[in-house]
Image (spheres, rainbow, N blue to C red):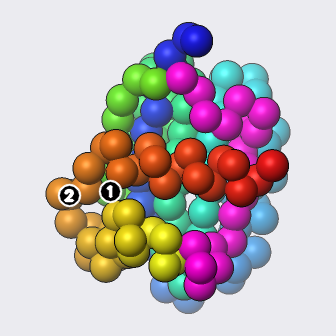
């Protein structure tokens, strides 16, 4: 199976932003990502974004640079950059509003508090395990 570049990050929604921002991000992603060969998942809860972008390294890094400059996001922190088989091949951008149960799983796997506080000591294999679980929940 061909490996693609995967980048996973966490960011905070700019305070005072309307939640319609999520729909705007998804509409734009779903329209532009297929042209660039980018797939992934966007997850959201309580003002926190978690997103996996996957595709050609150059395209993913260019998109991530735009996200870092996007005024809707702040405290953007990359948690994973690696090459692996594509996880979300059927999704130009999947979306999951994280439930209490999801947050519990994230706490067990990654520690939600570390993500919110943008601490960098998150293990790559733990992130990939969590994303794999979300992928199977989408089916």
Asked which quadrant contains residue 53, the reply is top right
80 vs 103, nearest the viewer: 103
Query: Is 86 included in the stretch rendered in magenta?
Result: yes
Relative side of 69 to 16, left or right: left
Q: Which residue is mark 2?
A: 120
Residue in the picture at 26% in, 50% down? 123
85 vs 52, nearest the viewer: 85
Relative side of 49 to 97, left or right: left
Q: Secondary structure at mark 2?
A: loop
Residue 111 visible to an observer of this rendering: yes
Q: Which residue is mark 1?
A: 77
Residue in the picture at 59% in, 79% down? 101
Give the extent of the magenta segment. Answer: 85-102
Image: 76 above or below 89: below
111 vs 58, nearest the viewer: 111
Answer whether labels 1 and 2 touch (C-beta < 8 Å): yes
Residue in the picture at 18% in, 57% down? 121
């Amino acid at each position: 199976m061909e490996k693609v570049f995967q980048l996973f990050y966490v960011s905070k929604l700019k305070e005072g932003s309307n939640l319609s921002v999520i729909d705007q991000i998804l509409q734009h992603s779903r329209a532009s990502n297929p042209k660039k060969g980018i797939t992934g998942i966007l997850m959201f809860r309580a003002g926190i974004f978690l997103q996996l972008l996957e595709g050609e390294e150059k395209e993913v890094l260019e998109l991530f640079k735009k996200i870092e400059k996007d005024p809707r996001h702040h405290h953007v922190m990359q948690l994973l950059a690696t090459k692996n088989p594509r996880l979300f091949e059927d999704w130009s951008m999947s979306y999951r509003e994280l439930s209490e149960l999801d947050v519990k799983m994230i706490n067990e796997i990654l520690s939600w508090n570390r993500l919110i506080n943008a601490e960098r000591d998150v293990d790559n294999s733990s992130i990939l395990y969590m994303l794999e679980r979300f992928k199977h929940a989408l089916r």
